[in-house]
Image: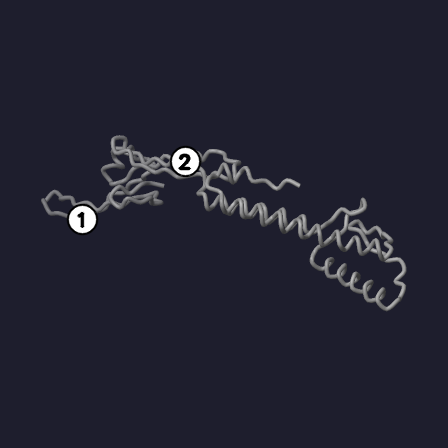
């Protein structure tokens, strides 16, 4: 990789052919081509050809999601060197907000999948909520018509069968609804805080705490 001084751009070249004019022993002029292997040329020869050697520093390590490498490029005319270096800088405020909002959305989605109730872990994803709501409706209809639903068996996340009375299952259904409402409300609060933040440090300080 070399820097084309005249075009102000990086080029990928190994061999450069330069058109030249020369005279033979009779004084007649002819057109020819000189061949240059750019990797073997010194810096002054490269300068005469309109190129500069590229020196690129290694990008620094970065494990902070709120920072990103910024590329710095400059041509040192005195040394005929084109420098490429990197510095770690904060992402923009809007990008930082997107990062935090994605994090909060992921936490919300995870918390809406399960509920620990009565010492057991239950699945409460969208399909499970439909099944729970259906069972609650069935209990209410049976109760209104004087029918006895008997024990209600429900499967935990680890495939254990738990037996509920109708009152216990109704309480379980209420707990699922309350848990879902709490998660959605908390996510909305935190999302608003992120959108109203005016600095990256403020955004970093917004955490989901149960």
Q: 144 and 92: which one is in front?
A: 144
Q: Is residue 165 left or right of residue 182?
A: right
Indicate the quadrant containing the N terminus: top left, top right, bottom left or bottom right: top left
* Residue 118 placement (x, y as % from top left): 81, 46
- Alpha-carbon distance for marks 2 and 1? 44 Å
Q: 21 and 195: which one is in front?
A: 195
Mark 1 lies on residue: 31
Q: Is residue 26 left or right of residue 123?
A: left
Q: 45 and 119: which one is in front?
A: 119
Question: Which numbered disc flags the more N-terminal residue, 2 or 1?
Answer: 1
* Residue 137 placement (x, y as % from top left): 78, 64
Mark 2 lies on residue: 86
At 66% from the left and 41% from the top, the residue drawn is: 210
* Residue 76 placement (x, y as % from top left): 28, 33
Quick one: label 2, few (<14), some, or many (20+) residues within 10 Å? Answer: some
Which numbered mark, 2 or 1, is in the foreground of this view? 2
Element type where label 2 sits in the image: strand
Tell whether label 1 touches label 2 (CB within 8 Å): no
- Which colour assignment does the render follow? one colour
* Residue 191 placement (x, y as % from top left): 55, 48
For residue 176, the mark is none
Q: 185 and 72: which one is in front?
A: 185
Is 95 above or below relative to 76?
below
Q: How many marks?
A: 2
């Amino acid at each position: 990789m070399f820097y084309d001084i005249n075009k102000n751009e990086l080029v990928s070249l190994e061999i450069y052919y330069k058109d030249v004019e020369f005279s033979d022993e009779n004084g007649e002029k002819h057109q020819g081509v000189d061949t240059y292997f750019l990797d073997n040329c010194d810096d002054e020869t490269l300068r005469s050809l309109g190129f500069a050697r590229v020196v690129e520093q290694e990008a620094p390590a970065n494990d902070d999601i709120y920072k990103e490498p910024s590329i710095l490029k400059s041509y040192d005319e005195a040394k005929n060197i084109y420098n490429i270096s990197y510095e770690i800088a904060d992402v923009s405020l809007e990008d930082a907000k997107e990062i935090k909002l994605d994090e909060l959305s992921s936490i919300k989605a995870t918390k809406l999948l399960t509920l620990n109730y009565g010492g057991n872990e239950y699945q409460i994803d969208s399909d499970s909520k439909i099944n729970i709501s259906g069972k609650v409706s069935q209990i209410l209809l049976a109760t209104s018509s004087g029918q006895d639903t008997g024990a209600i068996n429900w499967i935990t996340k680890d495939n254990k069968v738990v037996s509920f009375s109708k009152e216990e299952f109704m309480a379980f259904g209420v707990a699922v609804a309350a848990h879902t409402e709490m998660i959605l409300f908390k996510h909305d609060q935190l999302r608003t805080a992120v959108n109203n933040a005016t600095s990256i440090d403020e955004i970093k300080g917004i955490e989901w705490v149960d």
